[in-house]
Image (tube, helix red, strand yellow):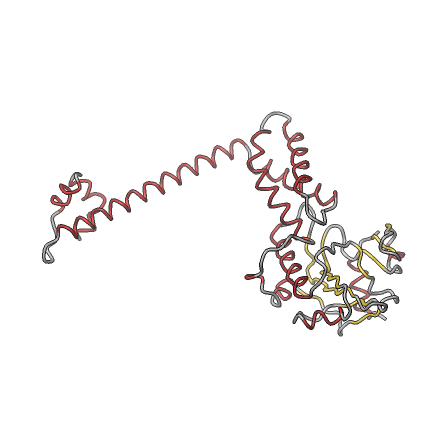
Amino acid sequence: MASAALAALVEAHAPRRPYCADDKHFARIRPKATALGERYIQLNPPAHQAWLILDIDRPGAALAWDDADLPPPTYIAINPENSHAHIGYALSSPVCTTDAARIAPMCYLAAIERAYTEKAGADFAFAGPLAKNPLHPSWRLWEPANAPTYELSTLAEFTGLSTRPAHTPEGVGRNCELFEKLRVWAYRAVRQFWRPGGQGIWAEAVRRQAEALNNYPVRLSNAEVSGIARSVARFVWRRFSPVDFRELQAERGRRGAEATAALKRDRREQDIQDAISRLSVEGWKPSMRTVAKALDCSVSTLSEGYGHLWT
């Protein structure tokens, strides 16, 4: 039987009307009070992710976290018939996943989710929303004392994120990758829609592009794709206007000119230093006039920009 602390976590984070089912292939939406009595339930709300759930389909799945040197989970729901399990980690600070979300926390969560899935040998294709309901008596439940919750930074301490190889995105990682791909495309494409009445056409174009990019083995839902498309369309339209584009181009031109000028100065200074070294005799440094003649430039050019080489 679940502890009061675990039951409180599940009830607090479950949606008001979650998907639920006694058979996971026949999910339906029900009020929370009804859904909490079903074998499978949607634990993560639509607007944020409060649980990191690992789906492990092999005997002995309940020990996967220990074998992989991961922290103790908040709960483990074990199928008594085959010993397959869902391992759940409750997040102390749930991560927003709507079109209003900041992308950095989503990507951080995605990287942790990927690392934990790999280390535990869990199913990369598992995307929910249904999970084994840890409050249902059909599952054999294991939980440590006090139903621990974790900050992302704590979960990350058990991973090697800086050296982890790339994988096909899964879970929330697909949201991050789709957002990034769509954003890069949008910055270039929006210029074609800068005209009166263009914002509505632009929003539709972004939505279609998002659908075209949603080609993952386990695709994002239509609602997720639409949310990401709306976020990118609004952000780019508001932050990347014709005036902003002209200012950006001007700034790029200014920086390019400064970089070119700096490179020319560095090359000229190197030429002067080479000439000084070449014309020096037994520690005697040639005069500015001698170097100017060797480089076919005026003495004033050397004195104004490179006089420090003679000080």
> 253 or 210: nearer the eye?
210
Q: Is residue 203 above or below residue 77?
A: above
> 67 or 155: nearer the eye?
67
Question: Which residue is painted at 61% across and 25% down in the image?
Answer: 196
Q: Position of residue 11 (x, y in %)?
A: 81, 60
Q: Position of residue 290 (x, y in %)?
A: 11, 45
Q: Is residue 84 left or right of residue 156?
A: right
Question: Which residue is painted at 73% across and 62% down in the image?
Answer: 54
Q: Position of residue 261 (x, y in %)?
A: 32, 41
Of all residues, the one furthest to the bottom in this rendering is 145
* Image quarter in which the N terminus is found: bottom right
Q: Is residue 300 left or right of residue 77?
A: left
Question: Which residue is painted at 65% across and 57% down in the image?
Answer: 109
How many numbered badges does the structure rendering display?
0
> 280 or 191: nearer the eye?
280
Question: Which residue is painted at 76% across and 53% down in the image?
Answer: 45
